[in-house]
Every structure is written in structure tokens, then in C-alpha cells.
């Protein structure tokens, strides 16, 4: 996984979730990112509508719609900027045969890394190299 791009990792994670996605009409796919690598991933969803009187409802995304969702998830990565740690959440819903996706990026930083970096030697600093 060290040499695998984040795009490929997201694609693989969603491929792994395909069987579960096929039974859903809505939910949130969550990917936890650390050092630009997908760690944990999964789906948050309500398995049934409590107001529905049809507990045996069969439906959800088709294989083609899962593929479309996977492509939208990968395409959304172009909006990710310089952060390397955080979470990506893809909220999806199936309405009238159309898949809709909303993406939320969450970047995470560690304050210990900000305050406790080893000091940079004056000769190694870029801003003093031209002096």
C-alpha cells in the first residue's frame, strides 16, 4: 500500500463495500486517512425505515449505480488539498433511480507536531540560503 495512490485505495475500498452497497438506498461511506493511506473504512446507514410497514423491502443500488457512486467518489478527490490525515465522508442517496452524492473532507492535524518539531539549523533554512 506504500506506493498505491489515494485514488486507487479509495477505489479498492469501495469495491470491497460493493456487496453491502447493493442493498442500500442511502448511507454514508466513511474513509479514515492517515499519511494519505486509507485505514479504516465502512458504511453508516439505517438498515430499515422505521415508518415502513414493509420489512421485506428489497431494493437498493444496482451494480451500475455502485460503479457510478465509486466513480463519483474518486472524482471528488480532486478537491482534497495538501492534508494527509483526516476523514472523507460520502453521503449518498438513491432517488428515482438516480444516485446523489455529497462529500465532506475533514483534515486533522496534531498540535504536538506543530510545537515540538526539531529546530531547523540556520544553514538548512531556505529563507537564509540566499543571504
Image (spheres, rainbow, N blue to C red):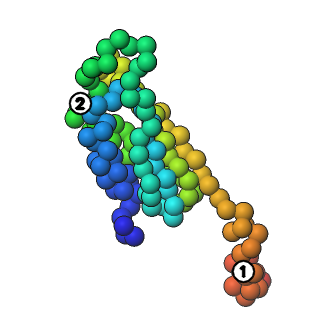
Residue 76 in view, yes or no? no
Residue 123 in view, yes or no? yes
Q: Is residue 31 above or below residue 44?
A: below
Q: Quadrant of the N terminus?
A: bottom left
In this rendering, would 86 be left or right of 130?
A: left
Instruction: Indicate the quadrant where residue 111 lies.
Output: bottom right
Residue shown at 25% from the left, 22% from the top = 58
Q: Quadrant of the C terminus?
A: bottom right
Give the residue pinned by disc 1: 118
Q: CA distance from mark 2 to mark 1?
A: 52 Å
Q: Is residue 26 above or below residue 104?
A: above
Q: Tag 1: Cα neighbours inside 10 Å, few (<14), some, or many (≥20)?
A: few
Residue shown at 34% from the left, 56% from the top = 8
Q: Tag 2: Cα neighbours inside 10 Å, few (<14), some, or many (≥20)?
A: some
Report x, y in % for residue 104. 53, 40
Q: Is residue 68 above or below residue 79?
A: above
Image depth: mark 2 or mark 1 in front: 2
Q: Is residue 104 above or below residue 2?
A: above
Indicate which disc, 2 or 1, sits on the residue closer to the N terminus.
2
As drawn, which residue projects farthest toward the left? 63
Report x, y in % for residue 96. 32, 16
Report x, y in % for residue 80. 51, 50
Q: Nearer the viewer, residue 43 or 89?
A: 43
In this rendering, would 22 be left or right of 1?
A: left
Report x, y in % for residue 34. 51, 61
Give the residue pinned by disc 2: 62
Secondary structure found at label 2: loop
In this rendering, would 106 be left or right of 55?
A: right
In this rendering, would 30 be left or right of 98?
A: right
Secondary structure found at label 1: loop
Residue shown at 38% from the left, 13% from the top = 52
Amino acid at each position: 500500500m506504500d506506493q498505491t495512490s489515494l485514488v486507487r485505495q479509495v477505489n479498492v475500498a469501495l469495491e470491497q463495500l460493493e456487496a453491502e452497497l447493493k442493498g442500500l438506498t442511502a448511507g454514508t461511506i466513511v474513509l479514515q486517512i492517515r499519511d494519505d493511506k486509507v485505514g479504516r473504512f465502512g458504511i453508516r446507514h439505517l438498515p430499515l425505515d422505521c415508518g415502513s410497514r414493509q420489512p421485506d423491502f428489497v431494493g437498493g443500488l444496482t451494480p451500475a449505480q455502485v460503479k457510478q457512486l465509486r466513480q463519483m467518489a474518486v472524482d471528488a478527490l480532486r478537491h482534497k488539498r495538501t492534508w494527509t490525515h483526516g476523514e472523507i465522508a460520502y453521503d449518498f442517496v438513491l432517488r428515482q433511480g438516480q444516485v446523489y452524492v455529497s462529500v465532506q473532507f475533514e483534515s486533522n492535524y496534531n498540535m504536538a507536531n506543530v510545537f515540538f518539531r526539531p529546530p531547523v539549523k540556520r544553514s538548512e533554512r531556505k529563507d537564509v540560503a540566499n543571504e
